[in-house]
Image (spheres, helix red, strand yellow):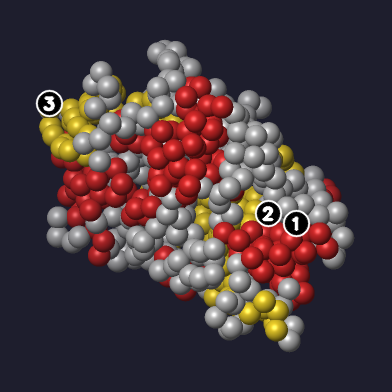
């Protein structure tokens, strides 16, 4: 995106992969909930989330030690127009699907069009920005864009490529559980039982074994994904040796719950993996499509009532710092000071649509850690009063005289979020606000969130060091009313739309950083999500036989790192 790629043209392997890693062994991992589909490319059904990373490839691949560059995978060469108005890919002659058939230009064109029109909504945005896609040679395809967006060439390189011939007699969106999309990646689905397990086998005839991008990658012969009813049952399975590893997201549990026999004997190892990624946003999302959450004063009041310091101390021993903005923990984050002149200049044209304190030295409400949280509760009451609310007989009433009550939607078995809500609910009751909690299974939860059928719900959106077009999917106005979109809060902000555009059209790193910091300010001061703690370090407990390279990528842990570059060593 900016300057030259970090790796030389003759690189031998990715910097965080062990090219000499032994092949073989088996890994068993766990998911909660179930599944009723093995097609990760359409909206229909529940799919094991790992599949699209393990079984399918794109024209280009990532170096997770570098934010703004891609390297050839299915494509052997890439060309772009002088202003990136088009991108042309030439396929590797040896590229093959798992059934041995060649990956062709026809497969590429069909994949882009089908995913863009029938696939999951996450694929639609790129297709809507393509003017035409055409064959330019026996193994070459050119994509011409209809908008001046410099990042589109990279995004185009990351679309999964499917086999057209597999879907001649059936639309992709109508795939049944047994219709497993054929891919070209190192792993194929070998066996499954609906809702219970999926077994992936390393393809011994994988076409890309010689590629530098694939050295030290996909080392284990078998990956099995087992499914459990909730996190507690899954943890017990790990303790008993049924799982090879588990990711721990609670620092208190990490410090206190890993004293079982296998951990004490050294059969289980605890590894902490640092990273340089932005915090992303994790917390409780409010649905702006429903009153009174469309009133920023109400959202601000609910944030003041959330006693993070007490909740954090109770549930994590205060071991995990709070998320302070969407890009906190990285150079893209809004600064702990008033907005710089460059950031202010980007925000100025939209001053009348942004929060009044967007340019100020904004901080999230903080308490002294006591249960009472008096100062913030007084401020919450003041904000609600300004919004026309009043307390009648101990009940907070809305301007129309009806009680202010709302529901918090959670997945069944989400123990941590339920514990957070139990504490938060008691604080809200002190304001005369009485909330209910609805816990439903994964399938129902997905359906309701996709339909925006909730008042407040738990939310997690990870961020990269190279944010771009996907930001429009997360909080762009066009996505706010598109069912199944990632803008579950329903944000409609001309300022945020313009800042995402500024981000994708930045011509140099400084311009990009300024746009990201301005976007971070607009999102954070918009009070759309009540943030909880950040995951500043990855925590993986694993069997001692599982090893990983000493050199870590700047992105730290992720599915393409673990189990991607790990290996089994007896």
| Badge 1 vs badge 2, beta-carbon distance below 8 Å | yes
Q: Element under label 1? A: helix
Horizontal side, residue 275 vs residue 190: left or right: right
Left or right? Give the position of 79 relative to 54. Answer: left
Q: Do the numbered discs 1 and 3 sit on residues whose CB atoms are within 8 Å?
A: no
Foreground mark, 1 or 3, reads 1
Cα separation, mark 1 vs mark 3, equals 59 Å
Up/down of 230 relative to 436, above or below: above
Q: Residue at x 67, y 43 (%)?
A: 362
Instruction: Locate residue 330: give its quadrant.
Output: top right
Q: What is the crowding at mark 3: few (fewer than 14 residues within 10 Å), some, or many (at least 20)?
A: few
Q: Earlier in the sequence, mark 1 or mark 2?
A: 1
Residue 20 lies, with reference to residue 381, above or below; the image says above
Residue matched to label 3:
137
Task: Report the residue at 61% width, 61% height from top.
Answer: 297
Specify which label sits upstream in the sequence, 1 or 3.
Answer: 3
Q: Is residue 166 left or right of residue 331?
A: left
Q: Is residue 535 visible?
A: no
Which residue is identified by label 1? Answer: 308
Q: Position of residue 203 (x, y in %)?
A: 39, 42
Point 38% across, 37% down: residue: 501
Residue labelled with disc 2: 532
* Residue 462, horizontal then vertical, whole percent: 54, 46
Position of the C terminus, as image quadrant, is top right
Q: Nearer the viewer, mark 3 or mark 2?
A: 2
The image quarter containing residue 54 is: top left
Task: Give the quarter of the figure containing the N terminus.
Answer: top left
Marking on residue 451:
none
Q: Is residue 124 visible?
A: yes
């Amino acid at each position: 995106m900016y300057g030259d790629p970090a790796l030389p043209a003759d690189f031998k392997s990715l910097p965080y992969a062990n090219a000499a890693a032994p092949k073989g062994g088996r890994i068993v991992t766990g998911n909660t909930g179930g599944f009723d589909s093995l097609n990760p490319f359409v909206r229909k059904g529940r799919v094991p989330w790992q599949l699209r990373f393990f079984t399918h490839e794109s024209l280009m691949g990532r170096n997770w030690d570098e934010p703004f560059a891609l390297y050839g995978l299915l494509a052997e060469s890439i060309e772009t127009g002088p202003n990136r108005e088009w991108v042309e890919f030439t396929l590797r002659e040896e590229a093959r699907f798992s059934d041995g058939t060649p990956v062709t230009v026809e497969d590429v064109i069909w994949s882009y069009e089908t995913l863009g029109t029938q696939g999951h909504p996450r694929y639609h945005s790129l297709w809507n920005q393509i003017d035409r896609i055409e064959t330019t040679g026996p193994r070459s395809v050119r994509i011409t864009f209809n908008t001046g967006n410099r990042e589109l060439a990279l995004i185009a390189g990351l679309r999964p490529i499917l086999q057209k011939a597999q879907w001649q007699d059936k639309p992709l969106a109508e795939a049944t559980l047994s219709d497993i999309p054929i891919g070209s990646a190192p792993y194929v689905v070998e066996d499954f039982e609906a809702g219970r397990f999926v077994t992936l086998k390393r393809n011994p005839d994988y076409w890309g074994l010689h590629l530098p991008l694939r050295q030290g990658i996909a080392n284990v012969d078998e990956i099995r994904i087992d499914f459990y009813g909730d996190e507690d049952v899954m943890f017990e399975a790990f303790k008993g040796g049924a799982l090879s590893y588990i990711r721990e997201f609670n620092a208190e549990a990490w410090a206190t719950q890993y004293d079982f026999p296998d951990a004490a004997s050294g059969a289980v190892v605890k590894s902490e993996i640092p990273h340089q990624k932005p915090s992303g946003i994790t917390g409780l999302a409010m649905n702006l499509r429903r009153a009174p959450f469309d009133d920023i004063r109400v959202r601000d009041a609910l944030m003041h009532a959330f006693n993070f310091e007490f909740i954090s101390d109770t549930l994590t021993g205060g071991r995990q710092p709070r998320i302070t903005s969407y890009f906190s923990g990285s150079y893209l984050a809004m600064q702990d000071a008033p907005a710089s002149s460059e950031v202010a200049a980007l925000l100025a044209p939209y001053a009348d649509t942004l929060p009044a304190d967007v340019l100020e030295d904004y901080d999230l409400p903080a308490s002294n850690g006591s249960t009472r949280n008096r100062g913030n509760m007084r401020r919450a009451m003041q904000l609600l009063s300004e919004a026309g609310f009043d307390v009648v007989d101990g009940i907070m009433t809305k301007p129309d005289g009806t009680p202010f009550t709302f529901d918090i939607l959670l997945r069944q078995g989400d123990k941590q979020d339920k514990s957070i809500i139990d504490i938060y609910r008691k604080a809200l009751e002190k304001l005369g606000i009485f909330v209910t909690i609805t816990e439903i299974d994964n399938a129902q939860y997905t359906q309701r969130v996709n339909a925006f059928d909730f008042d407040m719900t738990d939310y997690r959106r990870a961020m990269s060091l190279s944010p771009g077009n996907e930001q429009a999917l997360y909080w762009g106005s066009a996505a706010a009313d598109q069912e199944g979109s990632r803008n579950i809060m329903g944000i409609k902000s001309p300022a945020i739309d313009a800042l995402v555009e500024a981000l994708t059209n930045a011509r140099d790193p400084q311009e990009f950083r300024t746009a990201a910091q301005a976007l971070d300010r607009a999102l954070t001061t918009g009070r759309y999500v009540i943030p909880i703690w950040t995951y500043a370090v990855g925590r993986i407990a694993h069997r001692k036989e599982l090893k990983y390279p000493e050199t870590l990528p700047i992105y730290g842990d992720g599915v393409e790192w673990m189990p991607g570059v790990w290996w089994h060593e007896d």
